[in-house]
Amino acid sequence: MTKTATKISDYKYIKNYFDAIDSGEVKVCKEQLQLKDYLLNRVLNRDDIYLDEKMVEDSITAPEEYFPFSLFLWQQFAQVFIYGLRWKKDKTLVFDTYFVYVGRGSGKNGWISWNSFFLLSKKHGIPNYDIDIYATGEEQAKTSFLDVYNVLEANPKLKSAYGYNLTEIRNKTTQSKFHFNTSNARTKDSKRPGMNIFDEVHEYDDYKIIEVASSGGGKVKDYREFFITTDGNVRGGPLDDLKEESRAILNDELGIDKEGAGFSSMFPFIFKLDDPSEVDDPSNWEKASPSYNLNPSLKKKMNTEYAKMQRRPSLRITFMTKRMNSPLEDTRFAVASYEDVLHTREKEMPEKMEEVIGTLDFADRRDFASAGILGKYAGDVYFNQHTFIHASALQTQNIKQEIIDLALEQKKAQIVHGKRIEADYIVNWFLEQSKKYYIKKICMDMFRAKILQPALEEAGFEVEIVRSGSITHTLLKEVVDDLFIGQKIYFGDDALQRWYCMNVYEEHVGNGNIRYEKIDAETRKTDGFFSMLHGLNCLEEIYDSEPITVVNPLGDSGGFQPLVF
């Protein structure tokens, strides 16, 4: 039943996969090598876990009689950690969350169907082990469900054991049910799932459906969650968080002790290119698509797509993102990469700076207005913004509510009622900032100055009108690029300002000039970015507030001692 006498790492499905990696039989990415080291050195060598071999064997052999395919080596390896690896103290799963990040066509949905079929069955043995699969669209949500439905239809002897239709599959003995769901979170309360599957996580903008679905978990023995996906175009959502958690696990940043404290129950199963340049050597493709050399039809399809993308460059982005899990950003037009924008949260604005530039931008006083302060400290540039949002803007525009809620929570924004955003709101904010920093001047463009310059000057601030448009933007482009690419600009943890920056692109207008523009006029806002941009016009007028080190010629020991102010 269980494996305790010999090393767990010698179990055939583990050993076969690791041997294939070591021999070069299969080519894998850095994350697979890290997973191998992590499992061998931090998990499989523990004396408080054991292996239920029978459950692993059953999960591989029982469905094989009915499915039109067999599991590949990489899938057999993973079955060990889905079913067999358990804590001795309570026989619970060591891993109960599985992040499967693998290139399109590798067979992840068929594999999910295989496991769903097994978990419903009497062979699995847990009654009322309900399975729910979620996706943002019905067609994707139904993919694995229909695979199981078709298996039942193709095997007459199974029909008496199951009650099923195109919306539910139920095992009559275990009373376990299988459903598919779309992303309408309001309809998912009161479930008691044994397993939740979140398909194509790259399409999820937020955690609404995940939170609602997961809230019912843990009421059934051996509760599991699967996150299966290729990469995609949504940034800053659950997929990026899963990738970041995987990175921390695989880089051994959790501080796991002998008692298991710090141990993550997530199994990070990642397949991707190590570098985008590897795409031009097909022998590297199995790094991202481990079934490439095992599935002739997949191999033919990918080779055809690669040939087409040589003639149609637009296809390269899809191939790299979906097949290779190596998404390309069109850096010719993006203000900054997602990683560089995310890096801005690493430092908060220092409490002490000798002088700063005030900044201001808004399109309409019944819309958004972003006020900010820009300063330099120890070689870096810091920007702190505050957005005033007129209540009517949220009612009349299709703005992502999640980002507004987060901005309000982080106190980076406030809702303003009344006919318009009155000048007093903005003036008072700058007056509050002036209690901490010397505001040398406030920069805004001509349109904004006509409205607010008199009020700011009456409060004692110097106002400078800065130019806007392609000539000014072209002059500032080198500064903007240097700050983001060099990771020398910081906003603190300001999700709204990061959103503003990701909503801007460079439009090339000829003669070598560029103009910063809004990606989508209907759903995106850019006020904070342009507020910062106005201030960058005067960045060189303020000096760096780096701490000054002087030498005390006396010192307690009579020697020269450094003093930092």
Image: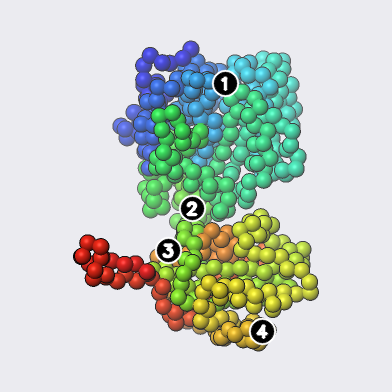
Q: Nearer the viewer, mark 1 or mark 3?
A: 3
Residue under the point 63% across and 29% down: 218
Q: Secondary structure at mark 1?
A: helix
The amino acid beneath tag 4 is Ala
Judged from the image, the secondary structure of the residue bearing numbered disc 2 is loop
What is the spatial separation of the Cα atoms under label 4 and label 1, in whole angstroms?
75 Å
10 Å neighbourhood of mark 4: few (<14), some, or many (≥20)? some
Q: Earlier in the sequence, mark 3 or mark 2?
A: 2
Q: CA distance from mark 2 to mark 4?
A: 48 Å
**Residue 393 can be seen, yes or no:** no
Q: Which residue is mark 4?
A: 455
- N-terminal label among 2 and 1: 1
Under circle 3, the secondary element is loop
Residue at which label 2 appears:
327
Residue position marked by numbered label 1 in the rendering: 63
Give the residue type at disc 1: Pro
Residue flagged by tag 3: what amino acid is it?
Answer: Gln
Q: Residue 203 got which mark?
A: none
Q: Give the image quarter of residue 559.
A: bottom left
To which residue does mark 3 refer? Answer: 487
Q: CA distance from mark 3 to mark 2?
A: 21 Å
State the residue in front, 224 or 511: 224
| Residue 423 occupies quadrant | bottom right
